[in-house]
Image (cartoon, rainbow, N blue to C red):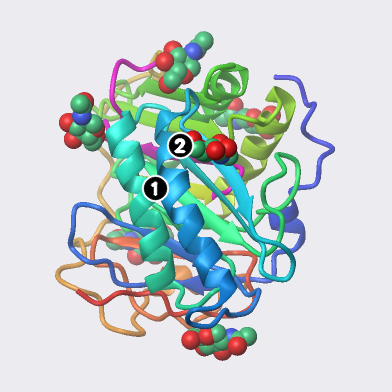
């Protein structure tokens, strides 16, 4: 692939003062992952809150009725102006999209109480609002949320991560070139390495108003973060307001995969390597509990709030303070 994105600054990394965060998820169908900003608070019944309310009524409709499943708008004037955007995953249907975005506005205000700047990510959409202009396709919104499966792959880690890398690069190429939605899905064969987990599935997506080069560059930056955060993980996501991706060992998107990649050619496919995987976390994590795997990297801080019930941990690598986010079940 051309290295047209190489010179660009992955600002996530450049500014990476770090923050690590994890929180309990309600054991509900719709998992949500908030990314609360640090742009101050609004007050009850303020014009700022009214402007969020206004956007919370228009954006779900606008996003779900848009061909690209995307909507961005601002309401109000400085200092109460609110910029908001919402994007549904490229394979979402209109009703699921509208519901997801609508929940996003509600959840954002619960999960980031009175925060002027907040984003909430779901499987099928995300919503972000801010008093800073996050609407421009080229600016703003560089903070990312990293979600990783708590489970390690049973296959040889190097082979797995190489296959994920090939898949995500190809899926990112596809997404950046997709002029209708800047969205791509891919499935890569892996049966030559691990017969029990014969496929790897991925999606990549950008804001649909981004130019192909910007999209690919954005995805390149977050794909590069994989080596720091997601090695050996059965699943992972890196989620930002401009671009995001996800990979899993199971199918999680709707419709046929846009891309099919062959399995890597390796010699024998022996039984999976001895699993270094312990039992998955059961029940809710304890407040403040974290495994040492998250702490060995100095980028991370040990102030974990809680651990995810679903076996996901989340990290905000470019934040310098910690936020409490969790809605208790
Ligand atoms: C905003 O509100 C949160 C929670 O209500 C509080 O912890 C935080 O200190 C407030 N931030 C500012 C800048 O006032
Ligand atoms: C959202 O929809 C409303 C009503 O249909 C329209 O007036 C407005 O311009 C739309 N906003 C955006 C950002 O699409
Ligand atoms: C782009 O994404 C859309 C929506 O997911 C999909 O239906 C379409 O096949 C893709 N288009 C191209 C040209 O790949
Ligand atoms: C829309 O998507 C949701 C969630 O994926 C699904 O449950 C629902 O059945 C879909 N509705 C239609 C009409 O396809
Ligand atoms: C994916 O693309 C990046 C950037 O072009 C490259 O450095 C990396 O080697 C690629 N990874 C794989 C597994 O092909
Ligand atoms: C996954 O691998 C990491 C890093 O090798 C290790 O610290 C962690 O304990 C493993 N997780 C599980 C659930 O085994």
Q: Residue at x 63, y 75 (%)?
A: 38
Residue 259 visible to an observer of this rendering: no
Question: Which residue in the protein does label 2 denote?
Answer: 63
Q: Residue at x 18, y 62 (%)?
A: 27
Give 102 or 22, whichever is nearer the viewer.
102
Q: Residue furthest toward the left?
A: 283
Placement of the C terminus among the 4 image quadrants: bottom left
**Neighbour tally class for label 1: few under 14, some 14-19, many 20 plus, Cα within 10 Å:** many
Q: Residue at x 51, y 57 (%)?
A: 145
Upstream in sequence: badge 2 or badge 1: 2
Residue 6 visible to an observer of this rendering: yes
Quadrant of the displayed image that contains ligand 2: top right
Q: Secondary structure at mark 2?
A: helix
Question: Which residue in the protein does label 1 denote?
Answer: 101
Picture coordinates of residue 18, whole percent (x, y): 63, 71
Q: Secondary structure at mark 1?
A: helix
Vertical order, 279 against 22 (above or below): above
Give the left or right position of residue 173, taking residue 203 as reference: right
Residue bounds of the magenta highlight = 240-260
Q: Residue at x 66, y 74 (%)?
A: 39
| 252 is within the stretch colored magenta | yes
Vertical order, 69 against 309 (above or below): above
Residue 16 lies in quadrant: bottom right
Q: Please report contact status of discs 2 and 1: CB closer than 8 Å, yes or no.
A: yes
């Amino acid at each position: 692939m051309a290295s047209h994105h190489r010179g660009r600054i992955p600002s996530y990394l450049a500014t990476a003062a770090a923050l690590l965060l994890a929180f309990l998820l309600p054991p509900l169908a719709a998992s949500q992952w908030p990314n609360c900003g640090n742009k101050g608070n609004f007050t009850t019944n303020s014009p700022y809150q009214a402007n969020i309310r206004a956007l919370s009524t228009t954006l779900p409709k606008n996003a779900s009725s848009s061909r690209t499943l995307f909507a961005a708008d601002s309401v109000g004037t400085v200092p109460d102006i609110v910029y908001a955007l919402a994007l549904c995953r490229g394979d979402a249907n209109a009703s699921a999209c509208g519901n997801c975005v609508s929940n996003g506005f509600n959840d954002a205000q619960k999960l980031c109480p009175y925060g002027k700047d907040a984003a909430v990510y779901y499987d099928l959409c995300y919503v972000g609002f801010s008093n800073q202009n996050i609407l421009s396709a080229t600016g703003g919104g560089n903070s990312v949320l990293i979600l990783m499966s708590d489970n390690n792959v049973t296959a040889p880690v190097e082979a797995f991560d190489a296959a994920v890398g090939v898949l995500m690069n190809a899926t990112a190429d596809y997404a950046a070139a997709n002029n209708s939605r800047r969205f791509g899905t891919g499935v890569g064969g892996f049966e030559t390495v691990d017969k029990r987990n014969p496929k790897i599935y991925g999606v990549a997506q950008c804001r649909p108003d981004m130019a192909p080069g910007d999209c690919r560059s954005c995805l390149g930056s977050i794909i590069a973060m994989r080596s720091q955060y997601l090695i050996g993980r059965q699943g992972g996501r890196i989620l930002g307001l401009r671009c995001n991706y996800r990979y899993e060992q199971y199918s999680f998107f709707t419709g046929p995969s846009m891309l099919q990649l062959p399995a890597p050619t390796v010699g024998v496919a022996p039984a999976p390597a001895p699993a270094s995987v312990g039992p998955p976390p059961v029940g809710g994590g304890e407040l403040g509990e974290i495994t040492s795997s998250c702490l060995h990297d100095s980028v991370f801080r040990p102030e974990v709030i809680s651990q995810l019930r679903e076996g996901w941990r989340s990290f905000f690598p470019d934040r310098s303070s910690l936020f409490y986010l969790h809605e208790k079940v």
